[in-house]
Amino acid sequence: MRLLKIKAVLVGAALAASTGALTACGSDGGDETDVEVKKASGLTGVAKELAEKGTITIGVKIDQPGIGFKAPGADAPEGFDIEIGRILAGALGISDDDITWVETVSDNREPFLQQGRVDLVIASYSITDDRRKIVGQAGPYYVTGQQLLVREDDKDRITGPDDLKSIKVCSVEGSTSLARVEDEYGAKPVPFATYSECVDQLQNETVDAVTTDGAILLGYAAEDPDNLEVVGDPFSEERYGVGYEKDAGGMCEFISDTLKSAEDDGTWATAFENTLGESGVETPDPPALDECA
Ligand code: GLU
């Protein structure tokens, strides 16, 4: 398996890390997708307001290689979710310099939207009926499925979710992954706030498996290919959506139209190849988008 290529943009200072806000102030352009920065026509409601304001705050993961990852010393995170954020910001006429990236973990995605701490959440965020009761979710822009990550030595012993009852499995609070193995497979998962903490536990041999979306696990396996392996078939369908505040008018239409254009003009595929594609995931056909209610 090919090692994940991490673009490290080295800067002198830890840039706003203390406030929890990660600023995007330029980059070397390395693996970034060329994104058109041009206000889309027909914006309404909150989408129009954001375009007029000219800045946007986006909640993302920063410890998931290929999806949302900030290398030590880098000035901005990178990954497929980040590229989706840049594409959406671009269609509001907002360039990289005016995007503030904020770290969200699985458990605070809804509160961050409800409290207005972020305008969007793009953070391996599965669309679910329960979440749609409290936040808006447009998409999906990608579909993956839950799997298991184990140490190479265990790959014949632990092969699927039915093995989880008898072993120590780590997953993340507030995720569909943790809830599913608990509710449907009788596991008693060890909960952490982030998947990178779970992977540390796996590498230390404190737990025997990590479970979440295959796309996330492949990113970790690509970083430690001699020791870690993704096993078994996917046992769920995780449809990644873009979260926004539930009553934010105009957002679903704006997000869906922009995703559709990016899919049609090849930007979506380029973004995928530059990010998740690097951890060995084949570029799929983009999934059909849900209708806006
Ligand atoms: N996609 C799943 C979820 O939204 C698992 C990944 C995550 O926790 O970010 O819950």
Image: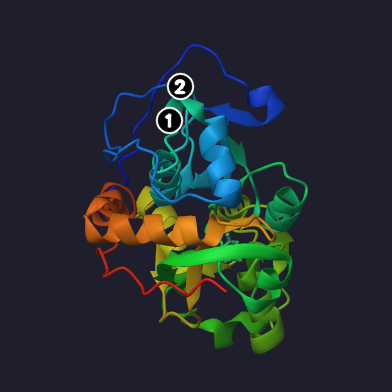
**Residue 179 image position (x, y, % from top left):** 69, 75
Pick the front one: 74 or 154: 74
Q: Are marks 1 and 2 in contact (CB under 8 Å)?
A: yes
Q: Quadrant of ligand 1?
A: bottom right
Tell me if residue 147 can be seen: no
Horizontal arrangement in the rendering, residue 78 relative to residue 134 (left or right): left
Pick the front one: 239 or 276: 239
From the viewer's perspective, is residue 260 above or below residue 121? below
Indicate the quadrant containing the N terminus: top left, top right, bottom left or bottom right. Answer: bottom left
Q: Which mark is residue 25?
A: 2
**Circle 1: residue type:** Asp
Horizontal arrangement in the rendering, residue 135 relative to residue 273 (left or right): right
**Residue 110 image position (x, y, % from top left):** 71, 57
Instruction: Give the structural element (helix, strand or loop) at label 2.
Output: loop
Residue position for label 1: 96
Tell whether circle 2 marks a residue whose Cβ is less than 8 angstroms from ligand 1. no
